Structures are given as structure tokens and as C-alpha cells.
Amino acid sequence: MKSVAQNEQCFRTIAQRIVDAENAFVDVLMTAGGISKADAERVFAYYRKHRISVLDAVGGRMTVKNGVFLDRDVIQRAVNA
């Protein structure tokens, strides 16, 4: 059975993966959409709110339900949504 310290370390590792996944997804939105970091964070929040993006906490990455959500024009429309 794992000790409390080992469990805590596992949770910290997963939490770090989540943060890394979110930051990487914001970078993808910036690159794909040609937008600023602030706009990419706004699009990220919109995608999360409407469940367009999905987090894989164990794998440490974000995915979208359909690849069209990573198109430049769709990202730019989401900035103004």
C-alpha cells in the first residue's frame, strides 16, 4: 500500500501534467490561430466552457472533439465569442 507521501507525489505529478497540457494547448491556439496569448487564453476558456476541448490528465494533453476547431478562422471567431 502506498504511503501518504507517495500519493501526494502522484497527485503533484498529475497536477503538473494538467498545467503543462493547458499551456501547450494555449501555444497551439496561438500558433494555429495567429493570435496573442491573451486571446488564446480566452479561446481556451471558451473551449473548456463549451466542452470543445477535452483533457487527458494521465497523458498530459488536450484534444478537441473535431479538428475543425483548430482551423484559423474558427479560432479567430472564438476570440470574439
Image (tube, rainbow, N blue to C red):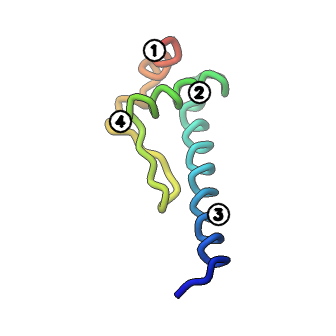
Q: Which residue is mark 3?
A: 12
Q: Which residue is mark 4?
A: 67
User: Which residue sits furthest top?
Assistant: 80
- Identify which residue is drawn at 62% across, 43% down: 23
Q: What element does badge 3 sit on?
A: helix
Q: Nearer the viewer, mark 4 or mark 3?
A: 3
9 vs 33, nearest the viewer:
9
Q: Earlier in the sequence, mark 1 or mark 4?
A: 4
Distance between mark 3 and mark 2 Cα atoms: 26 Å
Q: Is residue 10 above or below residue 1?
A: above
Distance between mark 1 and mark 4 Cα atoms: 15 Å
Q: Please state which amino acid type lies under the numbered disc 4.
A: Gly
Q: Which residue is mark 2?
A: 40
Q: What element does badge 2 sit on?
A: helix
Do residues under tags 4 and 3 come within 8 Å of each other at their CB atoms?
A: no
Q: Please state which amino acid type lies under the numbered disc 3.
A: Arg
- Identify which residue is drawn at 66% across, 24% down: 38
